[in-house]
Amino acid sequence: MNINNGKDLQSARIRAGITQAEVAEYLGYNSKGKPNASMIARFEGDYAKINPRVAKLLQLYFQELQQPVA
């Protein structure tokens, strides 16, 4: 799964059943010690571009979520 833009991110996140805050926490986007979901909303609304490093991290995250727990 490639995450190239905000629509890809939003679609993957909804399919996985996770919140913007959970994605923010995984990426380490924090504000005052709490996950900064507004950054994920900015990505999803195409107000901020997803750089290649973040795109790769997101790809890995959603792959991990699809793996069955042993």
Image: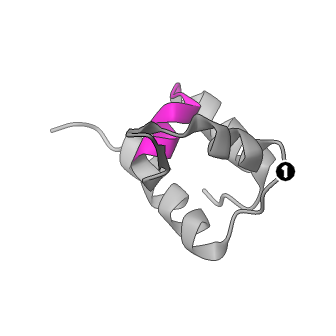
Looking at the picture, how far across and down is residue 67, in whole percent?
Answer: 34, 44
Secondary element type, mark 1: loop
Can you name the residue that lies furthest to the right here?
46
User: Which region of the structure is painted magenta?
Assistant: 17-25
Image quadrant where one finds the N terminus: bottom right
Residue depicted at x 51% and y 33%: 21
Q: Nearer the viewer, residue 45 or 7?
A: 45
Q: Tell me: 10 left or right of 61.
A: right
Looking at the picture, how far across and down is residue 59, in whole percent?
Answer: 53, 59
Image quadrant where one finds the C terminus: top left
Pointer 1 residue: 46
Residue depicted at x 60% and y 64%: 55
Instruction: Give the overall secondary structure of the magenta segment.
Output: helix
Q: Nearer the viewer, residue 62 or 28?
A: 28
Asked where in the image residue 3 lies, by quadrant, the reply is bottom right
Mark 1 closeness class: few <14, some 14–19, many ≥20 residues within 10 Å? few
Q: Tell me: 35 left or right of 7.
A: left
**Residue 19 painted magenta:** yes
Residue depicted at x 54% and y 40%: 36
Asked where in the image residue 66 lies, by quadrant, the reply is top left
